[in-house]
Structure formats: structure tokens, C-alpha cells
Amino acid sequence: MEPAPDPLPEGSPWTDDLHAADVSTYLCPNCGEPVESTAQTQSPFPVCPHCGEPFAISTGDEQADAEAEASLRTRHEERERELDIVRIKQLSALRRADIRTRSYFLVGMILSFSIGGQLVLMTVQRALATHRLDLKLLSYILFALASVMSAAYFFRRAAQMTRELNQPTQQDPTTPPDFSTLSSGRDWRKDFDSM
Ligand SMILES: [Zn+2]
């Protein structure tokens, strides 16, 4: 069987256009979406319009490709480092806020405790002086109890804050990532056809 004849003569502007269209659509290695060649993506590092990640295009020259890949990797690592610095700054800002909050709890605990002590003393003095449970003595007792309870509350909150601060700052998420919303590989053709 004879091969089908080329409908367009070799070297015509039409075949050149077809050829150019063929080689200038790339699949983003990051998200897998097709990225079409435009003047903007003619650079060796087009930025994927779907996910925003830059990637390297093969030039057919092995050395140039290796250099492009190394440069892309360096850029990616630099960005990761910058993100790490931002994360560390955020974590230490949170830590400072936690330490400040804990010191408020400790101040609250000390104040409540000293007020409570004062009220206990007043209760004892009043009871010794009057030998009867009048309204004033009852209110001393109630306020003394309330002060001791609030001191205990502030102590619990400060202790909880200390436990949080003693935890390592870098932690793996406690819940596994949820993949249930992702479609399986078998559905890709259906998804593709519905586009
Ligand atoms: Zn992409």
C-alpha cells in the first residue's frame, strides 16, 4: 500500500505553520495542562498559565537543556528558601504573641490570688469579731471563692499556653490529606471529552 501523498508541498508556509503549531504546545510538567506557544512562552522558561509554575522547554541541545534545568532548579530552591523564611517569621510572630498572652494569664493569676488571700483574711477577721454569719461575712466568703476560682482558671490557661509553646514548631499535619475529591486516572478521558 502506497503511503498517502503529502497534501501540501514540502517547504510551503502552510506546512511550516503546522509544524510550528505541533512543537509549540507543551504539557506543563507541574500540572499536566497544555501550554501553547505564544511570543511570551518562547523563552526557555515559559510560565504555565494554569498553575503559575515556570518550566524548561527542551531546545534539543543537551548542554543547553541541562543548563536551563539547573537554572530552573536554582530558582525553585530560592523560592522555597524565601517561603521558608516567611514561614519561620510567621511562626516566631505567633510564638511571641503566645508568650505575651501567657504573661497576661500569669498576671491575672497573681492578682486573683492576692485578692483572694486578702478576702480570706477579711473573712477570718470578720468571723472572729462578730461570731455570726451576716450578709457582709457571706459576701466576703463568696468573693474569696470567686477569686480563688479565677486564679485557678488563669493558672490552667497559662499552663496550657506553656504546653503549646513547648511543642516543636515544625509539625506534620495530624490529619492525612484528603484525596477523595480527586478523580481517578481512569476518568481522565471522560473529563477530557467534556472539556
Ligand atoms: Zn502548570
Image: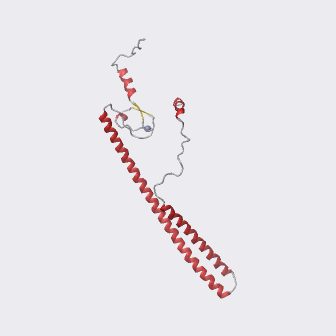
Q: Residue at x 64, y 85 (%)?
A: 126
Colouring scheme applied when the structure was drawn: secondary structure
Image: 106 above or below 41: below
Q: Is residue 132 left or right of residue 181?
A: right
Quadrant in the rendering for residue 38:
top left
Q: Is residue 120 left or right of residue 63?
A: right
Quadrant in the rendering for residue 63:
top left
State which quarter of the image contains the N terminus: top left
Q: Residue at x 67, y 87 (%)?
A: 130
Image: 70 above or below 90: above
Image: 130 above or below 74: below
Ligand 1 location (quadrant): top left
In the image, farthest residue toward the top:
1
Residue 72: x, y in percent?
35, 41
Q: Residue at x 53, y 66 (%)?
A: 159
Residue 124: x, y in percent?
63, 83
Q: Residue at x 59, y 74 (%)?
A: 148
User: Along the line of sight, which residue is nearer the eye, 36 or 166?
Assistant: 166
**Picture mark count:** 0
User: Along the line of sight, which residue is nearer the eye, 14 or 68?
Assistant: 68
Q: Is residue 34 left or right of residue 123?
A: left
Residue 155: x, y in percent?
55, 69
In the image, farthest residue toward the bottom:
129
Image: 68 above or below 10: below
Quadrant in the rendering for residue 152:
bottom right
Residue 10: x, y in percent?
34, 17
